[in-house]
Each structure stands twice: as structure tokens, then as C-alpha cells.
Amino acid sequence: MRIYLTIFIFFIIIPILLSGCGKIDNGTSQQNDLSKRVIRVITTTGMIADAVKNVGGNRVMVTALMGPGVDPHLYKASEGDVSRMVKADIIFYNGLHLEGKMVEVFAHMRRRVKTAAVSDGIDRNRLLSPPGYEGTYDPHIWFDVKLWMKAVEYIGEVLIALDSSHAETYQKNLHDYLNILSELDRYIIQEANKTEKLKRVLITAHDAFHYFGRTYGFEVKGLQGISTAAEAGTADVQNLADFIVDRKIPAVFVETSVPPKYVEALQAAVQARGYNVKIGGNLYSDAMGNTGTQEENYIGMVRHNISTIVNALIQ
């Protein structure tokens, strides 16, 4: 049934919706003057939505397709999503195959709506290419704050090109937000330094934290690969359990956008070896927190993660 729905969206719904739109030169010219109204922005993840809001300010109206707890690796566009994207002035997405099941949707959309992958603002030499995934890059760029700052700068460039009459507004917002992100980066380093180097081991369900590990000095291991589409096998659980016992790792972590069953199975395997490893808490990996919580934005999400990791590893 899902296969038929996907085919229906790709080949029936999208062409019909696009046919109702006037011709747009890949988003560089618009049907009306954007300087006279707010810009309608669609993003995939909440992290991108938060960045666009900070840079765009009151010049943008932002809708994120993927809410709290949603896994972008497995997300499939609904008919409603397609309708919202067609009506947008611009679509921002992560790229690097994070939104793997939406590639065909973006291919259709960019014929009529301006689309931008925020990862295009990052030098490919600074990206990680995990073993076993030759030819691809790790898409979890937001876990290195300095790397994410490059994506935020790119968002600013795209908005200025789209709405040049308000360039000063975007530039000021961008400058202010980059200063806040620089402060966040310093905070993470300060918190990480509270832990002994030998204890800086971060174990989660999937490999979302390698940029974090590279930048802030943590050894990172995950049961699944960089995509949650990969299943963790029995051998993966047993090997990682051996590692935890050998290194006397005090805690492992659950991700809010990934079912906890994998980490719970790992914990049970460790206990079967006569060693107790605790679940150190919930980390936000591919999605932010609920509206009204500290973790509803990128700053709060990152501060929560580093505090949770450090508190679990120093006890």
C-alpha cells in the first residue's frame, strides 16, 4: 500500500500541483514582489527551521515538515507536505542524503520552487566519510557547531539573494546569531573538559555524533550506521557489549528519534557479562525537543546534550 501511495504522490500529485504554478526560474524570479511580504519557507528538519528563523527574523514564515521525535532518514513526504512545498517561496533541506526518501520529491520541486541544501555551504574537505559508506558523507553536520555556522552563513546568503532589498536585516540577524553560536561552541568545550579523556566515550543507537566526537574530543560508537535504515545485528550488540565491559564505560545513551530497543538490548548484553552500564539519558540527535521545552531550539538541544553526556560520564 505504501509503495502505491509513493508512486501516486510522485507521478500524479506532484505534476498536478506543479502545473497550477506559474513558471519560476528555479526561484530566482517570483510571481510577486517578495520585498512586500514575508517569505514562505519550508524546511525538512527542525534544526534548519530554527536557523532560518534566526537569520530571517520577521521576514520569514517557516514551516518544518519534520517535528520532534521524527527520524529524517526514514521520513516520507505526504500529499500535504507536497502541497505545502509547492506553495513555498523556498525549500531548505539538509542534503548529504539525510532525507534519503525525499530525493525524488526534491528533484520534482526544484523545477518550480527554489530549493537549497544547507550542507552546500560547507567545504567537502571538512566533511566525514564513514567507513563502509564510500562516496557519501556523514550528514549530521549540526553536531559540530563551527561546521553548522557555515550552514547558517549559507542560509543567510540564499535569503539575501532571494530578497536583496532586506539584505541589511539578514546580515544583522546573521551576525548576531553567529555570535551566539560561537558562545555555544565555547560552552561545549568547557563542559567537555570536565570529563577525563579516557572516559570521553559516547555510545548511542546510531552513528549520529561523529562530528561532535571529532570536534570535542569524544570517541563515538553506534549500534547502527549513519542512517537508522540500517539494522543493528546480534554481532554488533555483542561486540559493543565487550567493548563496554573492557573499557568500563559507565553509561550509554538513548536518542529521542530512535526506538530505545537497541540500546536496551545492549544494556542487557552488558549485564549478562556481569557489568552494569546505565542509560545515561536521552539525547537529541536527528530532531529537536517539543515546543515549550528548553530543547525546542538548536541552542537548547545542544546544551541539553552536552550536559546529559558529561553528567552521566563523570558520576
Image (cartoon, grey):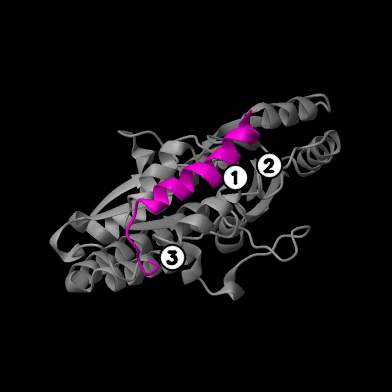
Please report the bounds of the magenta region as a residue range.
1-26
290 and 308: which one is in front? 290
Magenta stretch contains residue 121 = no
Tell me the amino acid under the disc marked 2. Ala
- Give the residue number, with chain letter if any, for mark 1: 73
What quarter of the picture does the C terminus occupy? top right
Tell me the amino acid under the disc marked 1. His
Q: Pointer 3: residues within 10 angstroms few (<14), some, or many (20+)?
A: many
- Give the residue number, with chain letter if any, for mark 3: 151
Residue positioned 57% across, 34% down in the render: 5
Marks 3 and 2, how far apart at CA: 25 Å
Q: Quadrant of residue 278?
A: top right
What quarter of the picture does the N terminus occupy? top right
Magenta stretch contains residue 18 = yes
Residue 75's x, y, as percent? 55, 40
Name the side, left or right, on which 257 lies relative to 169: right
Q: Secondary structure at mark 1?
A: loop
* Residue 67 makes an appearance in the image: no
* Residue 52 makes an appearance in the image: yes
Residue 46's x, y, as percent? 41, 46
- Give the residue number, with chain letter if any, for mark 2: 229
The kind of secondary structure the magenta stretch mainly shows is: helix
Residue positioned 77% across, 60% down in the render: 131
Single out the residue that lies furthest toward the left.
36
Q: Quadrant of residue 32?
A: bottom left
Q: Secondary structure at mark 2?
A: loop
Q: Earlier in the sequence, mark 1 or mark 2?
A: 1
Marks 1 and 2, how far apart at CA: 7 Å
Q: Are marks 1 and 2 in contact (CB under 8 Å)?
A: yes
314 and 303: which one is in front? 303
Q: Earlier in the sequence, mark 3 or mark 2?
A: 3
Tell me the amino acid under the disc marked 3. Ala
